[in-house]
Image: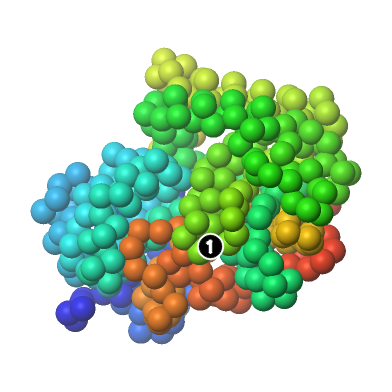
Amino acid sequence: MATRNYDILVWGATGFTGSRLVEYLALNAPAGTRVAIGGRNRSKIEAVRAKLAAKHPMAPISLESMDILIGDSQNAQDMHAIASQTRVVASTVGPYSIYGEQLVRACVEEVTDYCDITAEIPWVQDMSRELNDQAVRNNVHIVPLCGFDCIPADLGCLMLAQYSREQIKQPLLHVKGSIVGIRGGVSGGTMATLGNQLGIEAHRLWKRVKAQMSGSSTHQSQPPNGKETNRAIVHYDQTLGRWQGFWVMSIINSMATKWAGRELNYGPGFSYAETMTARNVFMAIAQSLGFAYLAALMFFSATRNLLYMLRAIPRPGEGPSDKFMKSGFFSLHLEAFSETEVFYGKVSGSSDPGYSETIKYLGESALCLAFDRDESFRPGIYPPSVAIGNKLLGRLRNRGCQFDVAHKIIPASHDSTKKIQ
C-alpha cells in the first residue's frame, strides 16, 4: 500500500454515532495516530470538531488539528478520492444500502481497509457476492457488522467454537443466546435504517420471523447430550429459569453467526438462535408483539412520519443523552452445544449497547485494522470474527468488555440486577 495521509478516516462525523466515534478515537487511539473526519457538509463538520476540541482540549489526539475531507456518499469519484488518502475507513453513514455501496467499492479498488456498524445483512451479502473476490486479490479487509449487531453474538460464538475445539476436542453444533438484561437508547439514524431495511427486505425478514416463531429456524438435529435446541420463540428456558420472547436483533445475529460458522468451520450444520428474557410468559408474549407492532409502524411511511411528528422516535442525528448512555448495560447469556457437552459463555457491557458499546466496538475495529494486521487477518468481505476475530477480541477484553466461557453459567461482570428495560 502506498503511503497514505491518514491512518483512520471517520466517515459520517456529524452524525450522532460518528461524532462520538471521533471523540473515542481522540481519547483512546495511540499517540501519533493520524485521524481525519469526513462527510458532505464542511460547516457542520467544523462545528463538531470545534465542539469536541473545546470539550477535550488536552486529548491525546488533537481534535482541532484533525483534517476534514468532504464528499458525497453516492458519488463514486468523491469516494475514490477519499478512500485513496487513508489506510482505514470507519463509516457510520447509513442506511448503508443507500449510502454505503460507492464507499465500499472505492475501498476495495483503492486497497483501503473498511469497517462499519451496518445491520443490513442482505446488503452486506450482496456486496460480498459482487466484490469479495476482488477484495481477496487486493488483500483488502472489508469488515461490516461491527456494532452491537453483531459483535457480541459473532465474537461470542467464535470464543465458544475455539473453546469447543481446543478444550473439548469437539465441533460446536449450536449456540442459544439469551439477552438477560439490557438498558439502552436509540438514535434517529438507527430508526431511519430500520425503516429503510423493512421497506426493502420486508418479505425476506417476515419469512425468517415466521420460521423463528415456529421454532423451525434453529438447529435441525438434536445433539447427543439430549438438550432441546429447537425451541419456539416464546418458551420457558430451563437453564435460566426464565421465560423468553422474540428479540429484534435475533434474525441479524443468526445470519451473521451462521455465515461465520461456515467460513471458520465451527461444526457441521452450526446454528445460532437468540431470544430475550422476560419476567413472565405474559411479558414474553407482549414484548414479542411489541417488536412486531413497532416494525409495522416503521414499515409504512405515513405512520413513520407520524411517529417523527409526535416525537415518539428520534429524527436522524438525534439520540439519547450522555447521562442515559452511561447508565446503560447489556448481558448476553450463551448456552453452547457440542456433540456430548453443554457449556456456557457470557458477553456483557457496562454502558448503552447501541451507542457507547457500539462506538467502542467500531473504534477498536478501526484501530485493529490500522495497527494489528498479521497473518491471522483474512482479506475479503466478512463478519468481524472471520476477518479480524482474535485480535479484536483481545482489544475488547482489554477495554473492559466481558467475553468469558466455562462449563457453568457465568455471572455478568457488571451489575446485572438493574431493571430490564
| Residue 402 percent coordinates (x, y) | 68, 66
Say left or right for 261 vs 299.
right
- Nearer the observer, 319 or 156: 156
The residue furthest top is 302
Position of 147 relative to 29 (above/below):
above
The amino acid sitting under disc 1 is Asn
* Among the 4 quarters of the image, the one containing residue 334: bottom right
* Among the 4 quarters of the image, the one containing residue 83: bottom left
Split into 4 quadrants, where in the image is the C terminus?
top right
- Image point 68% across, 32% down: which residue? 215
- Nearer the observer, 283 or 33: 283
| Residue 182 percent coordinates (x, y) | 70, 47
- Image point 87% across, 44% down: which residue? 238
**Which residue is label 1 attached to?**
265
Colour logic: rainbow
Q: Residues within 10 Å of mark 1 (few under 14, many from 20)?
A: some
| Residue 337 percent coordinates (x, y) | 73, 56
Split into 4 quadrants, where in the image is the N terminus?
bottom left
